[in-house]
Image: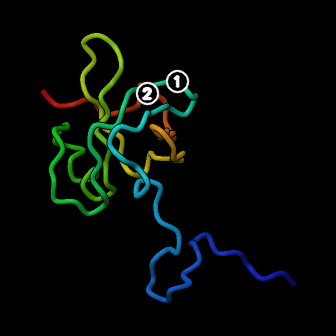
Amino acid sequence: MQPQQSAVPDDSAGLGEPSRPLPIAQVNVGMSVVDAAGEPIGTVSAVQQPGTHVRPDAPAVTVDRLMATGYLRIDVTGLGAADAYASGEQVAHVSEGAPGVVTLTVRGEALLSRAG
């Protein structure tokens, strides 16, 4: 009989925390952002890690979730485009380099627009 695989990442440190960092931990200001289909969205203009106390300028109903999961503020490409927010849960992959690319798990239309 095969041992069951756990859906929780390996806890090699024994502290109840995943041994690999969350993708959002690799995000830096200035990185390019693409959506799940590979379409360019914009550039990271701010990043806050999970558990932040920095409130985003986002719709009130989503502020607590963004603060809990961490978030990216994205300077959206296009004339008159408002900034958008992606939660830490929406960061699928980060490719480091110059400038680096953040790939999201959602399409651009699913991102939260800045309040205002």
Residue 79 as seen in the image, left or right of residue 5: left
Residue at the location (47% across, 65% down)?
A: 21
The residue tagged 2 is 108
Which circle marks residue 107 in the picture?
none
Q: Give the quadrant of the N terminus.
A: bottom right
Secondary structure beneath dot 2 equals helix
Residue 51 screen position, x and y as percent: 26, 63
Residue 68 screen position, x and y as percent: 28, 59
**Residue at the limit of the structure toward the front, as seen here:** 98
Q: Which three-letter amino acid code belongs to the residue tagged 2?
A: Gly
N-term mark: 2 or 1 = 1
Residue 69 occupies quadrant: bottom left
Q: Residues within 10 Å of mark 1 (few under 14, many from 20)?
A: few
Is 56 above or below relative to 49? above
Depth check, mark 2 against mark 1: the one in front is 1
Residue at the location (51% across, 43% down)?
A: 97
Is 5 above or below relative to 92? below
The residue tagged 1 is 39
